[in-house]
């Protein structure tokens, strides 16, 4: 059994506004499939257009929150997971609180008085997704909230702390605080490369955090971008995974393990200078609904077994199972109970 609060996530809670769109819409707003970006001024009218032109669904999202909710679902023990992030004092924020509580996650949101709850446009075409995040309140998170005794208690209680790379754009100071705490207390600190733009434009804060990271997650595109940014003359995912695992480490307690997903291709795990490949569960094209949340779900499934002390192979199996469930549904949603063996 997982102990209460064993897993903590920190990130940007966003409400996903998801719709199947056409090529014209993607072109109009300059959006690429399988990408994740922050909204610029040119994207602002997009949210309204999505809601009026297409059949939209509103789903509680945000990368880290998705992973934590999936881990919670897999564990089936209320309160095994906790989550910290910022929302607005509005209808969407209330919806988010309701969703998270129903999912069994112990959420400690900072509620911003001025900014609305963040949203993420999920544009789906041919089953592939593109994400455009308008952070709003999520961008207002400050380490002052984290330092409050009732919130820091979640950090103290957790043995595993997971943060998606997206949070590097919001509160690197908060990340540093928990990273140093994890290193000093022999805990596991886990992060995700999350998106090419994080590797490209937030390189300094990413590198600063990376030295504390025990497990690095990412997909093949993010891994290749990371390699390019660091001048590594290779786009071989296995080589890159090994090089990331050998990045200098601030704490010697745990070795670093790199976990790179490659869509329908095998998951690549690098540790001790070696690579292992694990096949994923194949899915016929006609069963694919959308890939939104697939990577988050993989991490959530993986974490659900990691916190139980299971071997890496079991973690990957659980990750693949969770991702397989999520891509057959709209957004990062799941049935009432898992049937993972």
Image (tube, rainbow, N blue to C red):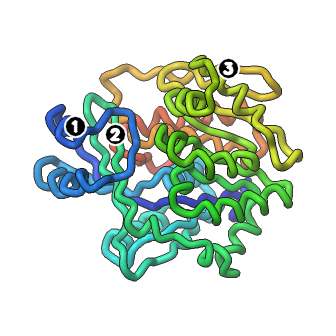
Decide: is 207 above or below 179.
above
Real-space Cα separation, disc 2 to disc 1, in angstroms: 9 Å
Real-space Cα separation, disc 1 to disc 3, in angstroms: 33 Å
As drawn, which residue projects farthest toward the left? 53
Where does the image place residue 214, in percent across and percent down from the top left?
75, 44
Q: Earlier in the sequence, mark 2 or mark 3?
A: 2
Asked if residue 186 lies left or right of residue 16, the reply is right
The answer, for residue 277, to whether it is visible in the render is yes
Residue at 17% x, 35% y: name it: 22
Q: Secondary structure at mark 2?
A: strand
Q: Earlier in the sequence, mark 2 or mark 1?
A: 1
How crowded pointer 1 is (Cα within 10 Å; few <14, some 14-19, many 20+) is rated as some
Circle 1 is placed at which residue position?
26
**Looking at the rendered structure, which numbered label has been put on residue 118?**
none
Circle 3 is placed at which residue position?
239
Asked if residue 198 lies left or right of residue 4, the reply is left
């Amino acid at each position: 059994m997982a102990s209460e609060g064993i897993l903590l996530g920190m990130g940007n809670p966003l409400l996903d506004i998801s719709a199947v769109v056409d090529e014209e819409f993607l072109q109009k707003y300059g959006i690429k499939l399988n990408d994740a970006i922050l909204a610029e001024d040119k994207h602002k009218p997009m949210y309204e257009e999505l809601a009026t032109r297409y059949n939209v669904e509103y789903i509680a999202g945000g990368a880290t929150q998705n992973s934590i909710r999936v881990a919670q679902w897999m564990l089936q023990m209320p309160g095994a997971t906790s989550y910290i992030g910022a929302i607005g004092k509005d209808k969407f924020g209330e919806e988010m609180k309701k969703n998270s509580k129903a999912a069994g996650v112990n959420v400690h949101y900072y509620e911003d008085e001025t900014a609305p709850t963040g949203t993420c446009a999920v544009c789906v075409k041919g089953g592939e997704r593109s994400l455009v995040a308008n952070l709003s309140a999520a961008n207002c998170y400050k380490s002052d909230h984290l330092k409050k005794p009732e919130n820091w208690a979640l950090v103290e209680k957790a043995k595993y702390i997971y943060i998606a790379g997206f949070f590097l754009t919001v509160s690197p100071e908060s990340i540093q605080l928990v990273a140093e705490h994890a290193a000093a207390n022999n805990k596991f600190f886990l992060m995700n490369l999350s998106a090419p733009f994080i590797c490209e434009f937030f390189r300094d804060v990413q590198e600063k955090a990376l030295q504390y990271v025990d497990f690095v997650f990412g997909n093949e595109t993010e891994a290749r971008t990371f390699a390019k940014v660091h001048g590594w003359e290779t786009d071989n995912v296995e080589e890159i995974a090994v090089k990331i695992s050998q990045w200098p480490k601030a704490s010697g307690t745990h070795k670093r393990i790199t976990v790179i997903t490659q869509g329908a291709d095998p998951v690549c795990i690098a540790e001790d200078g070696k690579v292992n490949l694990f096949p994923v569960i194949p899915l016929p094209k006609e069963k694919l609904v959308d890939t939104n949340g697939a990577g988050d779900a993989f991490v959530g499934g993986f974490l659900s077994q990691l916190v139980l002390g299971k071997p890496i192979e079991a973690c990957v199996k659980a990750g693949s199972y969770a991702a397989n469930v999520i891509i057959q549904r709209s957004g990062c949603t799941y049935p009432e109970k898992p049937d993972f063996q």
